[in-house]
Every structure is written in structure tokens, then in C-alpha cells.
């Protein structure tokens, strides 16, 4: 199975900050990577697919980059509604594994 | 507006069975592959299964292979997950989701496996 490792596991930041979350795959995944946001008690929300493509309606403050095995999610100008847990998932090879999550908290 | 509405969760004893349903609207269901993803209490997301748009291809996580069956009825715009031989470690919120790459999620249904 492909292992997806996110770093950091948790992150404290302030409103207005820019943050970056990293996701590393144990082998190449051809940019078949997606990012999700999840708030407590809610279903996840899809943000990015194909490593860099924003889903419809997702604000441009979210951006994805990377290729091969190393990927990043960047959130610019943090607002209170952005504090949540973020997950990456590869959909290149079954089973479609998730990262363990990165909890973004308010400093 | 796309809506995915899961139902069928509840409390079941170890070794028991449960069938989850996911009613889809706002999308051309028969052209979408569909997924199930679960989340144990306080834990991260775990991919469970996927089915092709026609239902002809299915894939499973090793943790559920041989116990769970994913299926769909395109005439009813409904996705199913038949869960057999349930274990305590299957306790989770189960989400139905469209495609991979996942674009839409349901609100989830809680399955609790306990005696």
C-alpha cells in the first residue's frame, strides 16, 4: 500500500498568517492527490484534486503544488473559518490511502 | 445542488450485519463512480470501497475485503454498502462520496458495533 505522511500533525497559526502543509507519498502517485478540509462534527469538504486544481467554489486562498511524491497545501491570509483539520489522499493506486491529518489551530 | 444522503446506520452486535444506503440527487448518478469512506471516533479518514459508474468494477480496503459489499442501483440513484461479520473496529461514521477524486460528500451515518 502507498503510505501518505503529512507534516506537521498539528500547527498553530494566527489570523492573517500563511501556512503550508506537506504530504509525502511512499511512491510516485502521478499527481493523483486530493486535499480535504474537515471541521469538528462535519463531513469533509473537497478542496483540491490533481494536486493543483481547485474544486468549484473553493476560494483562491487555497493552493496546491508538488509532483511525484511530495505535495503541499498552502493557505494564505488565514481566517477564523480556516481553522480545521486537513487531509491528503492519493487516488493513483488502490487502496486509496489518506494522510493522518494536520490539525490547524488558532494561536 | 448535489445531495448525498446516507441512512441505515445504528447499533449492531459483533458478528452482525447492516446495510447502508446513500440516496443521490443533483447529479447524473449513473455516470459517477462512487466511494465509501469511514472515520472511527476521534480518528482520521479511512478509504473503504469504490464502485464504477456501471457497477461492474469494485475495490475494497483490505480491512473490509470479504466482509463488505458495495453495490448500486442506477435506476434508484442509490449506493449501498452491505456490511457483514461486523467487528468493534468497524465502529465509525460512514460517508458516501462521489467519484474519485472525491468532490461531494454525504453527511455521514454512524455505525456502532458493540454488545
Image (spheres, coloured by chain):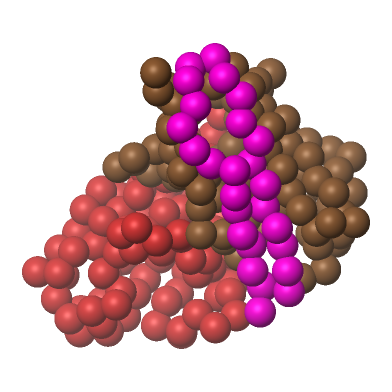
Chain colours: A red, B brown
Is residue A64 positioned above or below B87 on the image? below
Residue A93 rendering spot, x and y as whole percentages: 66, 39
Residue A11 rendering spot, x and y as whole percentages: 19, 59
Inspect the magenta stretch and tell me whether residue B12 lies in it.
yes
Between A27 and A82, the one lying in front of the other is A82
Is residue B39 positioned above or below B82 on the image? below
- The prevailing secondary structure element of the residues shown in magenta is strand
Q: Residue at x 18, y 64 (%)?
A: A105
Q: Quadrant of residue B17?
A: top right
Residue B3 rendering spot, x and y as whole percentages: 64, 69
Magenta part of the chain: B1-26
Is residue A65 toward the left or the right of residue A56 in the image?
Answer: left
Q: Residue at x 48, y 66 (%)?
A: A45
Is residue B91 positioned above or below B88 on the image? below
Does the rendering let one see residue B35? no
Does the rendering let one see residue B95? yes
Between A53 and B75, the one lying in front of the other is B75
Quarter of the picture holding the C terminus of chain B: top left
Is residue B72 toward the left or the right of residue B6 in the image?
Answer: right
Q: Quadrant of residue B2?
A: bottom right
Inspect the magenta stretch and tell me whether residue A20 lies in it.
no
Quarter of the picture holding the N terminus of chain B: bottom right
Q: Residue at x 23, y 79 (%)?
A: A80
Amino acid at each position: 500500500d502507498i503510505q501518505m505522511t503529512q507534516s506537521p500533525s498539528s500547527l498553530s497559526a494566527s489570523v492573517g498568517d500563511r501556512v503550508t502543509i506537506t504530504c509525502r507519498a511512499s511512491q510516485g502517485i502521478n499527481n493523483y492527490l486530493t486535499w480535504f478540509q474537515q471541521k469538528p462534527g462535519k463531513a469533509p469538504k473537497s478542496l483540491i484534486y490533481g494536486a493543483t486544481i481547485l474544486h468549484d467554489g473553493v476560494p483562491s486562498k487555497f493552493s496546491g503544488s508538488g509532483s511525484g511524491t511530495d505535495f503541499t497545501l498552502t493557505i494564505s491570509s488565514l481566517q477564523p473559518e480556516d481553522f480545521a483539520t486537513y487531509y491528503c489522499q492519493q487516488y493513483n493506486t488502490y487502496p486509496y490511502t489518506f494522510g493522518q491529518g494536520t490539525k490547524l489551530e488558532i494561536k | 445542488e448535489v445531495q448525498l444522503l446516507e441512512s441505515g446506520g445504528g447499533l449492531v452486535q459483533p458478528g452482525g450485519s447492516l446495510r447502508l444506503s446513500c440516496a443521490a440527487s443533483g447529479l447524473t448518478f449513473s455516470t459517477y463512480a462512487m466511494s465509501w469512506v469511514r472515520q472511527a471516533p476521534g480518528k482520521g479518514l479511512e478509504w473503504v470501497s469504490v464502485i464504477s459508474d456501471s457497477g461492474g468494477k469494485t475495490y475494497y480496503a483490505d480491512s473490509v475485503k470479504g466482509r463488505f459489499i458495495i453495490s448500486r442501483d442506477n435506476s434508484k440513484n442509490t449506493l449501498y454498502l452491505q456490511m457483514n461479520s461486523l467487528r468493534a473496529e468497524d465502529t465509525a461514521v460512514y460517508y458516501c462520496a462521489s467519484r474519485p477524486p472525491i468532490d461531494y460528500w454525504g453527511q455521514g451515518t454512524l455505525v456502532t458495533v458493540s454488545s
